[in-house]
Image (cartoon, helix red, strand yellow):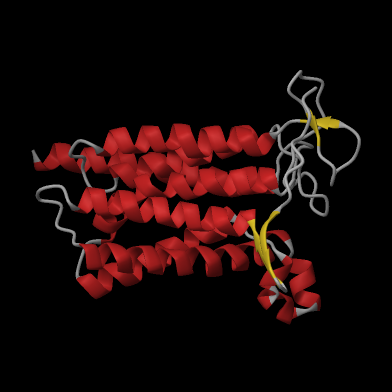
Amino acid sequence: MLSYPQIDPIALELGPLQIHWYGLMYLVGFGGAWWLANYRASQPGSGWNKQQVSDLIFYCAMGVILGGRLGYVLFYNFDQFLQDPLWLFAIWEGGMAFHGGLLGVIGAFWYFSRKYKKGLFAVADFAAPLVPIGLGAGRVGNFIGGELWGRATDVPWGMVFPRADELARHPSQLYQFALEGVVLFTMVWLFSSRPRPAMAVSGLFLLGYGCFRFFVEFFRQPDGHLGFIAFDWLTMGQLLSLPMVLLGTLMIVLAYRKQAVEQ
């Protein structure tokens, strides 16, 4: 069993102001995405400029925050929302959901595409390789905060999370960092490094994330107030990931089928 590193979740205190590592990870994610987006925009024939990149990152940041909070409330705590609708705005209490954030980002893509007269999938395919940076950074933030821990295990690398109990558990946050962050970024970035038909890059991101998230959920502790959704093994994370797998597969098939017809 490994020792869980006792890292203070508060990175910096300035009087009454507390800056948490989790919040800093958001900055790392958006900063990394902005840097790589500018790199992609600087390539010959990209059709993108620095102002467009800055606007896209800003709109996506808003989509992540608003969509992530809304998704967490509706997907994971709808009963509490019905009892206290104003709890939706209690963002200081924490609570974000990737699938809600994804819907918020898609909304940001749509708004950006209308504003700059770009195709929706041209925007999505440009941005898709950047998303895993934020995902990976966010999972590191979860690990530092000692939250979203894994299921009890006897593997040698199991850890006791102070906020959970005395059982050794899978460090599932690190599994997600590796798969949703490092591996997914490598896959989508390399795939997008060559010309691809519209929708293909976005489709690969959805397919890859959906598969990785579905797999890791077998090691991640289900939300206590939800438990298993069905069959004594299906979690809410898996249920929300299944449409991503199906949609991503469909998008890739349609993208290459359209390309074949046009050739």
Q: In the rendered image, which quarter is residue 230 located in?
A: top right
Relative to 128, does residue 68 appear above or below in the rendering?
A: below
- Quarter of the figure that contains the N terminus: top right
Counting from the top left corner in percent of width and height, residue 26 is at: 53, 57
Closer to the camera, 255 or 170? 170
Residue at 74% x, 41% y: name it: 149
Counting from the top left corner in percent of width and height, residue 98 is at: 56, 54
- Quarter of the figure that contains the C terminus: top left
Q: Is residue 135 left or right of residue 214?
A: left
Q: How many labels does the image show?
A: 0
Q: In this view, does 91 lie to the left or right of 113?
A: right
Closer to the camera, 9 or 52? 9
Counting from the top left corner in percent of width and height, residue 192 is at: 27, 39
**Residue 100 visible in image:** yes
Relative to 158, does residue 134 appear above or below in the rendering?
A: below
Closer to the camera, 134 or 6? 6
Relative to 35, does residue 73 appear above or below in the rendering?
A: below
